[in-house]
Image: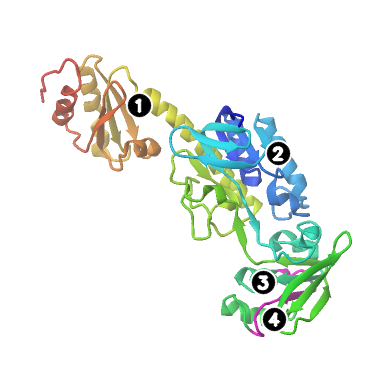
Amino acid sequence: MREKTVEQYDVVIVGGGPSGLTAAIYCGRARLKTLLIEKSLIGGLATYTNEIENYPGFPDGTGGLQLMELFHKQAKKFGVKIKLTDVKNVELEGDVKKVETFRTIYEAKAVIVAAGGRPRITRATDEERFLFDKGISFCATCDAAANTDKTVMVIGSGDAAIEEGMFLSKFAKEIIVSVIHDEGKMDCNEIARDQALANPKMTFVWNSMVDAFEGEERLERVVLKDLKTGEKKPITVDTCFEFIGYEPNTEIFVGKLNMSKRNYVITNERMETGIPGVFACGDVREKDLKQVATAVGDGAVAGVEAEKFIAETEVFRNQILQTERIGLIYVYSAIDAPSRELLPMMREVEEAYHGQVKLNVIDQYKGKSLCDRLACDVEPMTAFYTKGGEVVEISSKCDKRSVMEMLNTLVQNPIEVVI
């Protein structure tokens, strides 16, 4: 078997949808060597949306494909390298992350997971012929206006299906809802069910499921099958909206990232996954609203945080844990008077050792990630490390005697402790 090529990058982004492209723009603009890997189509699911009317900056609306082409162009402008291939495996622990494709192993200081997701489909006959821009949609928010005064079908009876159906009723002239249950039974909450049943634009086909989709270039009919009689009934529609669930593209991350029961990646507001240097953004995250606008926000945060992580890693290695002298780190809070008042004393201690000791000062709030690396979760604190960069002691004792007594065990020429 041919040995795989190894390439190094600052950041590798897995997924080329709105969030991945936004993260790439931020990383590229920060002059990080950035690689974006997308397995199918740059722009992701957004490229299949005919008209996007709720993305800021486009008062007349824009096509999803056109918008994503602009994102793509902007990422390339900032030097982002893009590879169209499938990721086979990832190794995310440790200082060097590895993202493996069929031919290459990409090593990176940081990884951004922006793999997105995919809507569940019915798998009925000829469904794939009409997916996305040919009559089958998965986003009422995106495509409602394009269906003004038209007849649409909604597949599903969960909260999302019924709520999106009611939203569509503000635009469409008729909403036909296919429900697999007996009459009156739905999977949504009772309030939504009652509102839907009372909506004059909404009619329901009970005990039904999709058997086939029909049409020429575009969807024209949905064939529903009665689950009790087996009878098949073709219904003429302009668009069919499927709301039967959503699946994240997280198969290769299972067991490697913290995930929800539905296999969405769990992050904090900084898009951190819990593994240092690994971030996640966009529809792959556990969150409520999945839109281009929210994906862009996620991607911006992930890109900035990745750049910050790499920069702070360099500071931590080269300045904080420098290897020329014995190290003293003082963690304090600039807004806490007692810990702030200890700063002059710490500098006096450094000077007293005549070049044997290097003092580094970290503001707990401004340098939170640096504190996390040292496991310093309170202030004030002191940390001591050898010339080899090995942290040997972390202490909440910040008085002059305690600090000097610890330093005397590390330096070559101890000095008398005078208080």
**For residue 173: magenta?**
yes
Q: Quadrant of the N terminus?
A: top right
Which of the two discs, 4 and 2, labels the residue nearer the N terminus? Answer: 2
Which of the two discs, 2 and 1, labels the residue nearer the N terminus? Answer: 2
Which of the two discs, 4 and 3, labels the residue nearer the N terminus? Answer: 3
Is disc 3 surrounded by few (<14), some (14 to 19) or many (20+) residues within 10 Å?
Answer: many
Q: Which residue is mark 3?
A: 156
Return the mark for residue 320. Answer: 1
Q: CA distance from mark 1 to mark 4?
A: 67 Å
Q: CA distance from mark 4 to mark 3?
A: 11 Å
> Label 3 sits on what residue type?
Gly
Q: Secondary structure at mark 1?
A: helix
Q: Is residue 164 above or below residue 199?
A: above
Q: Nearer the viewer, mark 2 or mark 3?
A: 3
**For residue 104: magenta?**
no
Is 347 on the left or on the right of 34, as rendered? left
Q: CA distance from mark 2 to mark 3?
A: 34 Å
Task: Mark yes or no: residue 117 visible.
Answer: yes
Q: Residue at x 49, y 57 (%)?
A: 260
The one of 324 and 105 positioned closer to us in this rendering: 105
Return the mark for residue 207. Answer: 4
Q: Which residue is mark 2?
A: 72
Q: Is residue 186 above or below residue 345?
A: below
Q: Quadrant of the C terminus?
A: top left
Q: CA distance from mark 4 to mark 2?
A: 45 Å
Magenta stretch, residue numbers: 168-184
Q: Secondary structure at mark 4?
A: loop
